[in-house]
């Protein structure tokens, strides 16, 4: 059996990426890395058959290529996972793995091949619909100039006062939309965050998108607001340092 790891472009492995996304029914946080050219991709070839692919990007700087963030092998070839992964990490020269824990294949490799594992963010998926109502609160489209075509921005108003801003990022894998928000400091801990999240979820579904979200693992206020607004925890973003061979 001959295993070859060949650097390629994302168009050449797009059908494999479609299989990866189909198999994993969640918002893939790193999807935009391919859209914006922030990643290098590699094909895995066994005896002239393309069996999978991997991708690397920069953990701290986008121009670096020190971190494996995507790794997929067609199911019938997964018995060769360890052989392929060993050759892949040698070929790309990565020193870290960064992944979502709801990505079962890569997260299992992270726990096996890395040390100093650190959780950076909590991932959320929609779980149930809420029906909060706060008198005189309204969500409006943000009419200020926005040069990002993937950003649908909104403002939350209490009468004529803007109390929060937020929106939906659409540069994630379909059908997902990433929800973000920020409540002005003077208006925090009044339920405005959860109300805005509720309304942003409704806007996402109107666009035929599925809302998803994430927050820093230490941001207990955002975590609480997301859970209150009907999200549930579906995973974490974790990073580990690849253990060097003795």
Image: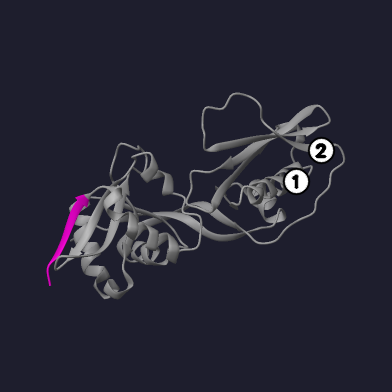
Specify start and end residues of the magenta stretch as a single range.
Answer: 1-7
**Residue at point 59% right, 51% down?**
209
* Displayed quadrant of residue 37: top left
User: Residue 137 has which mark?
Assistant: 2
Q: Tell me where residue 182 appears, x and y as whole percent.
A: 65, 37
Mark 1, secondary structure of its residue: helix
From the top left corner, tell me how far across and down residue 86 is, in percent. 21, 63
Residue at 22% over, 49% down: 8
Asked whether, in this view, residue 203 is left or right of residue 105, the answer is right
Q: 3 or 173: nearer the eye?
A: 173
Report if residue 91 lies within the magenta region. Answer: no
Q: How is the image coloured?
A: one colour
Residue 149 placed where, x, y %? 52, 34
Residue 141, visible in the rendered structure: yes
Q: Position of residue 202 (x, y in %)?
A: 69, 49
| Disc on the earlier residue, 2 or 1 | 2
Q: Quadrant of residue 46?
A: bottom left
Q: For residue 195, which numbered disc appears in the image?
A: 1
- Circle number at residue 130: none
Residue farthest along the top direction in this orientation: 145
Describe residue 203's horizontal placement relative to residue 64 as left or right: right
Q: Residues within 10 Å of mark 2 (few under 14, many from 20)?
A: some
């Amino acid at each position: 059996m001959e295993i070859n790891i060949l650097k390629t472009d994302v168009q050449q492995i797009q059908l494999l990426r479609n299989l990866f996304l189909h198999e994993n029914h969640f918002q893939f946080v790193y999807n935009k890395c391919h859209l914006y050219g922030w990643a290098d991709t590699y094909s895995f070839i066994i005896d002239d058959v393309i069996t999978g692919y991997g991708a690397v990007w920069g953990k701290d700087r986008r121009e670096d290529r020190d971190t494996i963030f995507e790794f997929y092998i067609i199911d019938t070839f997964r018995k060769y996972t360890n052989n392929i992964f060993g050759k892949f990490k040698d070929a790309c020269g990565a020193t870290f793995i960064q992944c979502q824990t709801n990505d079962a294949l890569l997260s299992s490799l992270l726990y096996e091949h890395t040390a100093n594992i650190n959780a950076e963010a909590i991932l959320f998926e929609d779980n149930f619909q809420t029906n909060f109502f706060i008198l005189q609160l309204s969500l409006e489209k943000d009419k200020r100039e926005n040069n990002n075509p993937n950003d649908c921005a909104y403002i939350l108003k209490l009468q004529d006062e803007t109390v929060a801003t937020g929106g939906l990022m659409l540069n994630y894998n379909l059908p997902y939309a990433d929800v973000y928000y920020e409540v002005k400091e003077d208006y925090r801990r009044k339920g405005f965050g959860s109300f805005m999240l509720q309304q942003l979820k409704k806007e996402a579904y109107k666009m035929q998108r599925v809302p998803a979200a994430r927050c820093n693992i230490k941001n207990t206020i955002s975590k609480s607001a997301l859970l209150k607004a009907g999200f549930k925890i579906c995973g974490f973003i974790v990073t580990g340092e690849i253990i060097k061979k003795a």
